[in-house]
Image (cartoon, grey):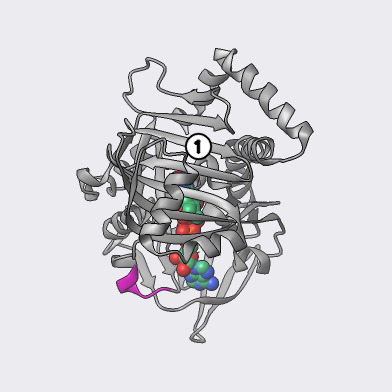
Amino acid sequence: MRDFDIIVVGAGPAGLAFARGLEGSGLTVALVERQPAEVLAEPPVDGREIALTHRSVATLEKLGAWNRIAPDQIFALRAARVYNGRSSLALGFDTDGGPEDRLGCLVSNHLIRQSLFDAMEGQDGVTLMADTGVEHVHADRAGARVTLADGRTLTARLLVAADSRFSAVREQLGISAEINRLGKSMLVVRLSHEMPNHGIATEWFDHRQTIAMLPLGEHISSAVLTLKSATIERIAAYQPEILAAEIEDRFDRRLGTMQFVSGPRVYPLATTYARHFVSDSSALIGDAAVGMHPVTAHGFNLGLQSAATLSRLVRGAAQKDRPIASPLLLRRYETRHRLATRPLYSGTNLLVHLYTAESPRAHVARRAALEAAAHFAPLNTAISRMLLRH
Ligand SMILES: Cc1cc2nc3c(=O)[nH]c(=O)nc-3n(C[C@H](O)[C@H](O)[C@H](O)COP(=O)(O)OP(=O)(O)OC[C@H]3O[C@@H](n4cnc5c(N)ncnc54)[C@H](O)[C@@H]3O)c2cc1C
């Protein structure tokens, strides 16, 4: 007799969405999280602004989380522009006259986490074990066993790792991953600005820096600056008004003068892709499976998709009284999620390389690619469609 049907490690957005997706399935779930319950109920602001696709919004609606986010905290993303250095050529992504008036929405990460936690709290069958980390896991065809930091041991039919891109559970399951530490960091800071942004996100790849502006209302944006880690640390230590002036300058005053609102926060950049998403009686979801480069803003969306794909398969099996961790079911999850993620993961890394490589050959290739895209509308349309769908 096992303690639970499923043990989920990590109550980040992926772990919460997976547990929430099992509502009404009759399955018992232990959700183990290192952070205390009070922090999960009111997550601190972390400066991440998540660009949600229409598909993610629909998933959050289904999970009962979307209507818990205050409407004035949801910002329309009407279009996106990608610039290369001083060139006036830009890749433009918009809704292309389709039925939608926006590419997606921007919502702060802490609000999404809070809404998912609120929706999940008190859910039948879910036991939250907060304030304790998972120390050790073992899984084989018969099931999974987990040892907590406080010494308790739990058993289950299925183990789900949702413990982030440097997943210790993944490692203990013996699943290796492609890990690229990029030696760069991202600084995120919220600023107000003189000129309106019209709901357009801008990504500007300039000489040795990348700077993005994400619209949070007409005159407020989240600036995301990517540089060598040592430089970012130095800039993060600036006084608020000097930091605002620095970003204003680095953005070439395209939005006029800027004032500091909140932040800054720093995140080291690393991308990861697990060689397998499943093993005996276990599966990886969220960043534990795929840690995307944030430049195309897909990490959260794909994490949510992984949680939805796996919970749908597990629910379906439970309803038919079939095993919830059979090799066939797990393989099905892996195949679907690899298909959904591999092209985007590789495409994003290629895009980043194309735009950030500094050799003269790379400059020529970049310009050629931009010109090709600017004069070949179907390419832009295809990318926009991809953004709208995922
Ligand atoms: C600056 C920045 C901007 C981003 N912007 C976007 C964007 O615009 N769009 C987008 O789609 N994505 C974006 N992302 C990516 C997105 O934030 C992640 O993909 C998402 O948070 C991953 O969710 P997760 O649940 O898999 O992992 P996490 O959010 O990392 O959660 C993992 C949880 O597991 C817990 N945990 C870890 N180890 C253990 C353990 N041993 N025992 C118990 N608990 C444990 C942790 O405490 C944590 O709560 C951005 C990321 C960054 C850094």
Q: Nearer the viewer, residue 335 or 192?
A: 192
Within 10 Å of the Cα at label 1, are there few (<14), some (14-19), or many (20+) other Cα atoms?
Answer: many
Disc 1 marks which residue?
A: 203
Is the C-beta of the residue carrying label 1 under 8 Å from the nearest atom of ligand 1? no
Looking at the image, which residue is at 29% across and 55% down?
A: 115
Q: Position of residue 329 (x, y in %)?
A: 58, 47
Residue 385 in the figure: left or right of residue 354: left
Q: Amino acid at mark 1?
A: Glu
Image position of 29 with respect to 356: above or below? below
Place residue 104 in its image quadrant. Answer: top left
Q: Is residue 329 magenta?
A: no
**Residue 317 visible to the viewer:** no
Looking at the image, which residue is at 42% across and 45% down?
A: 248
Magenta region, residue range? 35-39
Looking at the image, which residue is at 64% across and 17% down?
A: 372
**Residue 299 visible to the viewer:** yes
Image position of 293 with respect to 371: above or below? below
Q: Position of residue 346 (x, y in %)?
A: 67, 38
SS for dot 1:
strand
Magenta part, dominant SS: helix
Q: Nearer the viewer, residue 359 or 5?
A: 359
Q: Position of residue 203 (x, y in %)?
A: 50, 37
